[in-house]
Amino acid sequence: MASDLADQNKRQQTQNVLRTFVGADGRLARLPEHFETGVEYPERLVDERLRVWCEVDAEAA
C-alpha cells in the first residue's frame, strides 16, 4: 500500500514537471534547465539531456 502511494506521488510529480515544459499538444513549450538560451549544443549532448525527459514521459504513460 505504501508502495502504491509512493508510485502515485512519483507519477504526480512527473506530470507536474511535464506540464511545466510540455504543452497540451505534446510539444516542448519551454527548455528544461539543462539548456541556456543562445547556446549551441551538439546533438549528442541534447539527446543525452532530453533522454531523461523522454524516459520520465514513458514512465508516466
Image: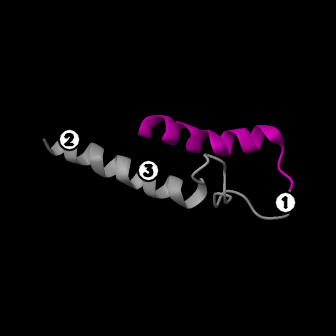
- Residue 58 lies, with reference to residue 6, above or below; the image says above
Q: Label for residue 39? A: 1
In the image: residue 13, left or right of residue 20:
left
Look at the image and name its color scheme. one colour
Residue 59 screen position, x and y as percent: 44, 36
Residue 4 screen position, x and y as percent: 21, 41
* Amino acid on which the number 2 mark rests in the picture: Ser
Count of marks overlaid on the render:
3
Mark 3 or mark 1, which is nearer to you?
A: 3
Q: Residue at x 72, y 58 (%)?
A: 35
In the image: residue 16, left or right of residue 53:
left
The image quadrant where one finds the C terminus is top left
If you read the primary sequence from the N terminus, does the residue marked by circle 3 or circle 1 appear first? 3
Q: Residue at x 68, y 58 (%)?
A: 31
Q: Residue at x 85, y 63 (%)?
A: 38
Spatial CA span between label 3 and label 1 = 27 Å
Closest to the observer, 41 or 30: 30
Q: Which residue is mark 2?
A: 3
In the image: residue 14, left or right of residue 18:
left
| Helix, strand or loop status at disc 3 | helix
| Helix, strand or loop status at disc 2 | helix
* Amino acid on which the number 3 mark rests in the picture: Thr
* Amino acid on which the number 1 mark rests in the picture: Val
Furthest residue in direction left, as rendered = 1
Predominant SS of the magenta segment: helix
Looking at the rendering, the stretch of residues picked out in magenta corresponds to 40-61
Q: Label for residue 19? A: none
If you read the primary sequence from the N terminus, does the residue marked by circle 2 or circle 1 appear first? 2
